[in-house]
Amino acid sequence: MVNFFDTVKKWCLVSCWLIVLSCLGLLTFAKRLHPDEARTLQQMAVTMGADGWKLDDPCQSYSAGPNITCDYCVGADCHITELRLKDLHLTGTLPPELVQLTYLVKVDFTRNFLHGPLPTIWSTMKHLEFISLTANRLSGMIPKEWGSFPSLTYLSFEANNFSGSVPKEIGYLVNLTHLIFSSNKFVGRLPDTLVNLKNLQDLRLSDNNFEGPIPEFIGKFTQLRRLELYATGLKGPIPAAIFHDLENLLDLRITDIAGEKSDIPTLRSNKSGINLVLRNMNLSGTIPDSVWDMIPQMDMLDLSFNNLEGEVYYKPNTAKHVFLAGNKLNGTVPESFRLNSKGHNIDLSYNNFTWPAATCKGHSLEKLNTYQSSSFKNQLLPCLDNFNCQRYRRTSLHINCGGPNVLVTNANGSLLYEGDQQYDGYGSAMSTTVGPYWGFSSTGDFMNDDDKIKSYIIRDDERFGDTERLYITARKSPLSLTYFGCLENGTYTVKLHFSEIEFREYSGLGRRIFDIYIQGKKMSKDFNIEEEANRTGNKVVVQQYFNASVTDNTLDIRFYWAGKGTTCVPNRGYYGILISAISVCQSKLFKFTKHFNYC
């Protein structure tokens, strides 16, 4: 007969072990999503146009469905705290039902095709800290009620079609650390109430139509680490406090703004890994000593396309990327740039430097862009004396950008498009000849790509057949790309061939926008490949420009990214210029030759 006291003793031991295991987290009980939230998810799936979601166990992650975290549990019922819906091709609208997930902390809708307005009711969600709406088709104005989130720290409207002015109520979100308005259609002045956002670490206003000067209150965001102002519509000058008082700032990008000439303010920072981009904003004078003193601390220095003068000073160490193109800099190129012992990327193009013969001897110029950097304008590429366009093509030039040589044939005959695919290596500053009569110059680094972009050539073998081989490949560039050719003096017709082969499954979501210059004259502003293709109903676009005048045997075709368009489709760091092919023919040949279809 079993002793009663022995039985009680055994049960006590078992109970004690259960308590210990439970405290150590080694014992688990069956958990389930709260039934109300399970029903809410099903309703949300319908609203968002989600097909094929398997929600038998919603708190698990599925490759074809939502990524959900349910880590707030009361008894056997768990509640959703994080909802990550990135890259799911959702085609519906933002779900008002989200408000029923009362314990939700984070929601991420990045890169979908959601459309429509912002649900006003979301602003009542007291636990919500993170909202990303990045890269969708959302539109309308920001409701003033969205200034009522009590806990919000991260808010991204990036890459949508939002319009109107920023409501003053956004300035009441005093816990915000990240605020991103980039790539929308916002207008008007930024409200003064934004001065309340003292905790901001990341502020991005790029690619909008804001009005007025850059607000002085930005200089009071002392916690700011990243400030991005590409093509905002705002005007200069830059408030001095941005340079003097923001001691935590590691990433400052201001480009393509109008305003009177101004000098570069004195910089103060003891940080390392700095990105300083002050491009195309009418800066004048010389580059101050404070910039040269900081250059060993920098990852990037970009002062391109300003009106800067004077000499470039010697530094034994320099930034990983130094872009000085399109200024009036002069003097002898420093030895540190010529030696370039660490293989950094340095762009000196479109300047007035002196290149003595001895300067070029024994130096590798592989990552040094020297195109039109000489005070002697007949030197297209200093240190390449044999390329000065004393020899030139008589009538035409045809280039397959980023691809191999291609023979294009139709009923009228054949033409050879020369390729440049052998120059496929990653390099943010390069200039080279491809043949005896032409070459190209490329500048810029795809920022925030986590160094994943290793090539400036892309290809798409699926969309195009043998009859459209010119569009299988394309050359891209994040900032400035120039194709130059040696031609007989005369008047030419230029045809530029484009096809958007990078967005692919995200077609219609990304926006690639850039400017086109021929012989230094802006021929197209805010050119958008997909927009032009949709307008004509074709998957390829051919832009035609007449009467390009060649007077010194040199033709210069330049593409420039002016800070507009999306920078996060199909992934972060994808933007800039894309060109498939170039055709150049003398105007008289274009009119009368049987090959006019190619010219």
Image (tube, rainbow, N blue to C red):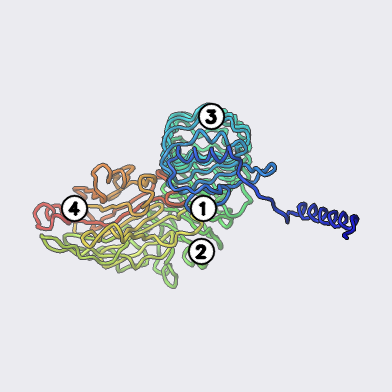
**Residue underneath mark 2:** 336
**Residue underneath mark 3:** 121
Between the C-alphas of marks 2 and 3, the distance is 59 Å
The amino acid marked with disc number 3 is: Ile
Tag 1's secondary structure? loop
Image coords of residue 408 (percent x, y): 19, 62
**Mark 1 Cα within 10 Å, few/some/many (few <14, many 20+)?**
some
If the image is split into quadrants, where does the C terminus sit?
Answer: bottom left
Q: Tell me whether circle 4 and circle 2 mark residues in contact (CB < 8 Å).
A: no
Between the C-alphas of marks 2 and 1, the distance is 52 Å
Between the C-alphas of marks 1 and 3, the distance is 29 Å
171 or 325: nearer the viewer: 171
**Mark 3 Cα within 10 Å, few/some/many (few <14, many 20+)?**
some
265 or 465: nearer the viewer: 465
Q: Residue at x 10, y 60 (%)?
A: 412
What residue occupies the far bottom of the structure in this picture? 362
Between the C-alphas of marks 1 and 4, the distance is 57 Å
Labels 1, 3: front one: 1
Disc marking residue 492:
4
Between the C-alphas of marks 4 and 2, the distance is 41 Å
Image coords of residue 498 (percent x, y): 28, 52
Labels 4, 2: front one: 4
**Quadrant position of residue 347:** bottom left
**Residue underneath mark 1:** 62
Q: Is residue 8 left or right of residue 344?
A: right
Give above or below for 215 relative to 551: above
Upstream in sequence: badge 1 or badge 3:
1
Image coords of residue 283 (percent x, y): 46, 43
Tag 4's secondary structure? strand
Q: Tell me whether circle 2 and circle 1 mark residues in contact (CB < 8 Å).
A: no
